[in-house]
Amino acid sequence: MPHPHRHSILSSLVLVLAACSAEPGDARDGDAAAQPEAPVLQKAAEAFAIEAHGSFDEPWAMAFVPGTRVLLITERPGTIAGIDTATGRRFAVTGAPKVDYGGQGGLGDIAFLPWDSASTLRPRTIYLSWAETGQGDTRGAAVGQGKLVCTPGGDCAIEGLRVIWRQAPKVSGRGHYSHRLAFSPDGKYLFVASGERQKMAPAQDLDNTLGKILRLDLEGKPAPDNPFAGKAGARPEIWSYGHRNVLGLKFDAQGRLWDLEHGPAGGDELNLVEPGQNYGWPVVSNGDHYNGTAIPRHATRPEFTAPAISWNPVIAPGDFLFSSSPLFPGWDGQAVIAGLKSEGLVRVRIDGTRAVELARYDFGKRLRSVIQAPDGALWVIEDGKSGRLLRLTPR
């Protein structure tokens, strides 16, 4: 029979060896906050009361009409669906733009001016993003502004939609459009995530808008005090650069901007986005190329801004939010991420400029987007041809 003291020593040795043989990546190379313990893993049905509210055709983004419980959902083939979450009534929204559908392209994000929150369904300014066709075999992201006009108890239409910004240049391929939208807390500026369109190198060049986050006024013009305004050879709308494929763009309660982006084979990132900073793609990454070619890690090139946290294996984020829900008081200020490859929600605590993963909730389905309703409930939508819309409250 083993001596109990010897068993204690062996147990301690096992723990030490396990720590030393951990997966290479964030905590060991100094690019992200060391995680003090493994995140909690839980089945979604154990953590949430889940209500299903129908399915949608390749949903991509969601937004509540300000001041209402009406939820609008963009569907990538080019349509917008509406649902009154108070009654369950579904309705059509006409006036969506013509999109270049295919690959990762199609209809994208949807957003409303944050202060436009009167309680009636009067006309509201609406912003949309999408992939559009260019000359020859080229495409690019676009952002448009229009008015959402609804009839009481009836359908809605987008009127006067006009393009206010276009990705430049348009290039071949149908990937990495990004085109996420976020308004600054003061309501003066529109931030647009512009992916590098799988072309990599342009993300490091300031003479184009690929692989950048852009800061515009509400009419789509470059904000006058952007970090590269007036610099020869630089686009004046650029706020930050060196990005890959940004699928989440949000401000936290402190007014700081964060992005959530896909890495290559490994290295998904949550970044604190600051003006003029270079986030390193494709020079550095905490992942490697899909063919196995190594990419230098962030720790090797400190001149580039490192992520607050990165993931290897990837979570393949769809979108995220910063929780302020009274229904989940222990989550206040934490990032809640909809995961595609990870097939669930990932909950992350922000520690200053770093972050640590706290929990994962397994849905067994790719999640495209997550949003917080006016009553504090979380709504998530699954990815794909028949993506279900789900309302989550604490169990």
Image (cartoon, rainbow, N blue to C red):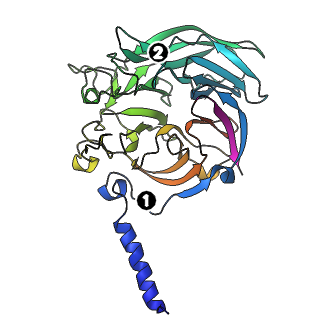
Q: Is residue 120 visible?
A: no
Confirm or deny contact between disc 1 and disc 2 (CB under 8 A).
no
| Mark carried by residue 307 | none
Q: Which residue is mark 2?
A: 100
- Labels 1, 2: front one: 2
Q: Which residue is mark 1?
A: 35
Left or right position of 304 against 273: left
Of residue 303 and residue 382, the one placed in the foreground of this image is 382
Q: How many residues crowd mark 2 within 10 Å: few (<14), some (14–19), many (20+)?
A: many
Whole-angstrom CA distance, mark 1 to mark 2, is 42 Å
Q: Amino acid at mark 2?
A: Asp
Residue 89 drawn above or below residue 325: above
Q: Secondary structure at mark 2?
A: loop
Q: Residue at x 59, y 50 (%)?
A: 361
Q: Secondary structure at mark 1?
A: loop
Q: Residue at x 45, y 90 (%)?
A: 5
Q: Amino acid at mark 1?
A: Gln
Of residue 375 and residue 201, the one placed in the foreground of this image is 201
**x and y, in percent, of residue 275 in the image:** 33, 33
**x and y, in percent, of residue 335 in the image:** 52, 45
**x and y, in percent, of residue 235 in the image:** 29, 20
Q: Sequence order check: which comes first, mark 1 or mark 2?
A: 1
Q: Residue at x 58, y 23 (%)?
A: 74
**x and y, in percent, of residue 243 in the image:** 34, 33
Q: Is residue 146 magenta?
A: no
Image: magenta residue range: 385-395
Left or right position of 189 against 388: left
Q: Residue at x 39, y 41 (%)?
A: 271
